[in-house]
């Protein structure tokens, strides 16, 4: 858990997503969780790096996100770490996403998981995969900016 701004406390951040994908649009969604999952998330034991979102039967599902089992409970009461979790979004948003994903071949990926006024929320991004030359260009641009900032600081 990293930062706290205006009732928002970041739990997990997918920093690699912006390197691998061009993020076209972002959406905020709630997550349907079990009690032990919430306790484990409060301890910060979540990894969203490998996750993605699927839209099936008019519902959005968060898949392949690892939430570690809660350690202070027996295995009988615990949850499956990589189970699919339903995202809580408006029907219009989901229908819009279905059109974008199926027609344009875009991907839905989790960008950030955070607490917002006591509720666990996730920001998902509508993304298009970057090619290798795009990644090189981005890193070159970043290096150039850094060099310019250094030169300005010295002079």
Image (tube, rainbow, N blue to C red):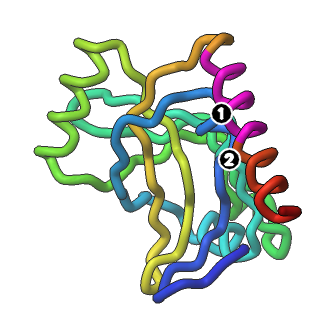
Name the residue tied to disc 2. Answer: 15
Residue range of the region highlighted in magenta in the rendering: 134-144
Q: Relative to residue 131, is residue 18 depicted above or below?
A: below
Q: Which circle marks residue 19 in the picture?
A: 1
Q: Secondary structure at mark 1?
A: helix
- Identified at 52% across, 19% down, the residue is 129
Please identify the dominant SS of the magenta region. helix
| Side of 15 where 74 appears, left or right | right
Q: Using the image, tell me which numbered label, if any, was put on residue 117.
A: none
Work out whether residue 82 can be spotted. yes
Are dots 2 and 1 in contact, CB under 8 Å? yes
Q: Residue 28 at what x, y percent from top left?
A: 36, 57
Residue 123: image location, x then y, percent: 45, 54
Q: Is residue 71 left or right of residue 92?
A: right
Q: Position of residue 116 (x, y in %)?
A: 45, 78
- Count how many numbered circles sit on residues in the image: 2
Residue 17 lies within the magenta run? no
Q: Residue furthest right?
A: 154
Distance CA(mark 2)–CA(mark 1): 7 Å
Query: Is 143 in the magenta?
Result: yes
User: In the image, 122: left or right of 70?
Assistant: left
Q: Closer to the camera, 40 or 139?
A: 139
């Amino acid at each position: 858990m990293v930062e706290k701004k205006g009732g928002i406390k970041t739990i997990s951040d997918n920093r690699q997503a912006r390197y691998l994908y061009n993020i076209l649009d972002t959406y905020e969604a709630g997550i349907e969780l079990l009690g032990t999952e919430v306790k484990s998330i409060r301890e910060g034991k979540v990894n969203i790096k490998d996750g993605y979102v699927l839209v099936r039967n008019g519902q959005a599902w968060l898949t392949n996100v690892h939430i570690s089992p809660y350690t202070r409970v027996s295995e009988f009461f615990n949850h499956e770490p990589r189970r699919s979790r339903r995202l809580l979004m408006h029907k219009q948003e989901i229908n819009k996403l279905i059109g974008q994903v199926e027609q344009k071949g875009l991907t839905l990926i989790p960008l950030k998981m955070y607490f917002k006024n006591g509720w666990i929320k996730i920001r998902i991004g509508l993304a298009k995969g970057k090619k290798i030359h795009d990644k090189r260009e981005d890193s070159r641009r970043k290096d150039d900016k850094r060099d310019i900032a250094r030169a300005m600081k010295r002079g």
